[in-house]
């Protein structure tokens, strides 16, 4: 499985990479913001996106909208990890077609459960 981690903080990218490192055989690419993420998505075979919301140049919601409205990977699984934690934030993220949502600080076990849940839903929808 090929993951794309979109996060402007290098330290947080490392934390997320460590969290998914024990999920088995996978490759991980990194982007500092949504602009870099779109370039990577257009040039690499990515299976799962983990993105922050608050980033420079193109934030996570803009990124999700570009992915969902694009032609190449509109159904790719997307997990948003962010400090935005109000009920309205959560509603806004889901209205913009984020598959799931985690509030920072993150916990490895929660990341694993969210990824598994998203993948199980995607498999069930494709049957």
Image: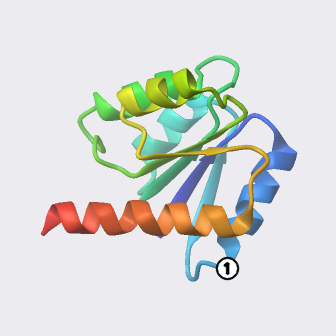
Q: Nearer the viewer, residue 56 or 108?
A: 108
Residue projecting furthest to the right? 11
Vertical placement of residue 116 versus 69, above or below: below
Q: Nearer the viewer, residue 85 or 97?
A: 85
Residue 124: percent from left, percent from top: 21, 67
Direction from residue 81 to residue 90 in the image, left or right: left
Residue 2 in view of the camera: no
Please tell me whether mark 1 sits on a helix, a strand or a loop: loop
Q: Residue at x 46, y 56 (%)?
A: 48
Crowd around label 1: few <14 · some 14–19 · many ≥20 (10 Å) = few
The number of numbered badges drawn on the structure is 1
Quarter of the picture containing the C terminus is bottom left
Residue 27: percent from left, percent from top: 58, 68
Direction from residue 49 to residue 54 in the image, left or right: right
Q: Nearer the viewer, residue 113 or 126?
A: 113
Residue 107: percent from left, percent from top: 74, 61
Vertical placement of residue 60 versus 4, above or below: above
Instruction: Classify residue 25 by image quadrant.
Output: bottom right
Q: Residue at x 45, y 43 (%)?
A: 41
Residue projecting furthest to the top? 57
Residue 36 in view of the camera: yes
Instruction: Classify residue 83 by image quadrant.
Output: top right
Residue projecting furthest to the left? 127
* Residue tagged 1: 22
């Amino acid at each position: 499985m090929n993951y794309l981690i979109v996060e402007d903080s290098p330290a947080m990218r490392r934390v997320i990479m460590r969290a998914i490192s024990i999920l088995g055989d996978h490759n991980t690419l990194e982007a500092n913001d949504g602009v870099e993420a779109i370039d990577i998505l257009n040039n690499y075979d990515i299976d799962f996106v983990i993105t922050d919301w608050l980033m420079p140049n193109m934030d996570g919601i803009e990124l999700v909208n570009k992915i969902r409205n694009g032609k190449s990977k509109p159904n790719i699984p997307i997990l948003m990890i962010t400090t935005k934690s109000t009920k309205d934030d959560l509603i806004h993220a889901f209205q913009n077609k984020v598959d799931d949502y985690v509030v920072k600080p993150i916990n490895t076990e929660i990341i694993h459960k969210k990824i598994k849940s998203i993948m199980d839903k995607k498999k069930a929808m494709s049957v």
